[in-house]
Image (cartoon, helix red, strand yellow):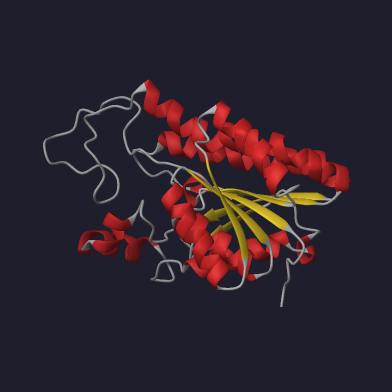
Amino acid sequence: MITLSGRTALVSGAGRGLGRAIATSLAQAGATVVAVSRSADELADFVSSVTADGGRAFGFPADLRQADDLDRLRDRVLAEVGEVDILVNNAGINIKRPVVPLPVDPGQTVGQPGSGPASVGMTDEEWDSILDTHVRGSLHLIRSFVPGMLAKRWGRVINIASSAVARTPNLVVSYQVAKGALTQLTRGLAKEWAPYGITVNTIAPGQFRTSMTKALHDSPEGQAWLMERIPMRRTGDERELGALAVHLASDLASFITGQTIYVDGGETL
């Protein structure tokens, strides 16, 4: 049994989906969890759930695309909770559009079932929003909380990417670029911080049912598409992802750093 008792973990995008599953697993392992999300209601529900289960959690609403929000988040967490030992950069968004409009026929499907029209290109604002959430927001959290880890010479940074970095799905180039940047950030920082007892790793989930992928998972066409792609012929269980995060956050993973671990049922093989 792995215990994270005495550790404090901050998880961005913890209000729902995979972020909430990871945050829940960390709390169940004994960590004090600082949950960050844009939705105060989702955070309140998460904190209530953890508390009812005997755990300890705090919710801090923040938009990672806003520098002022991030500064306020840093100041509040350090003042009200203390230094962070484990940082999970999970917050993310996805907008499925081509970089430029594609000359497709009416009704022609490009990408996975349920994707939006390929004839409408991505705007600069949409592109920036994706990069700001995944990359700039994560970098700001790293700058806010890793100095405390360096001072203690112990810390864990876990970046949540996607199996899309090892595949080439259509209409998600911006998402791939953002997640690819996170995986490279993992490698660079892992080497830079290795002498100081800090590990940096990436978890790259495959197909999990979340609010972002609900339409795909709930349609017959989507299920057929998924089963054709995944050798294990099933999608992931959120608890499997949470268990890996707990392991990477523990002392037992102190010799694992700079890695991207795919949790995808063999989809990227």
* Most foreground residue, 37 or 252: 37
User: Residue 14: horizontal and vertical position, in percent?
Assistant: 51, 53
User: Residue 143: horizontal and vertical position, in percent?
Assistant: 71, 34
Task: Please identify the quadrant where the N terminus is shown.
Answer: bottom right
* Most foreground residue, 222 or 17: 17
At x 24%, y 34%, the residue is 118
* Most foreground residue, 67 or 40: 40
At x 42%, y 61%, the residue is 208
- Left or right: where 58 falls relative to 217: right
User: Residue 160: horizontal and vertical position, in percent?
Assistant: 56, 49
User: Residue 169: horizontal and vertical position, in percent?
Assistant: 38, 44
Relative to 211, residue 76 above or below: above
Q: Is residue 16 visible?
A: yes
* Most foreground residue, 48 or 150: 48
Q: Is residue 269 visible?
A: no
Of all residues shown, which one is farthest toward the left?
106
Relative to 26, residue 58 above or below: above
Of all residues shown, which one is farthest toward the bottom?
1
- Left or right: where 189 falls relative to 18: right
Q: Quadrant of residue 137?
A: top right
Q: Quadrant of residue 215?
A: bottom left
Q: Quadrant of residue 126?
A: top left
- Left or right: where 228 falls relative to 182: left
Of all residues shown, which one is farthest toward the front?
80
Of all residues shown, which one is farthest toward the top?
124
At x 55%, y 32%, the residue is 69
The number of callouts visible is 0
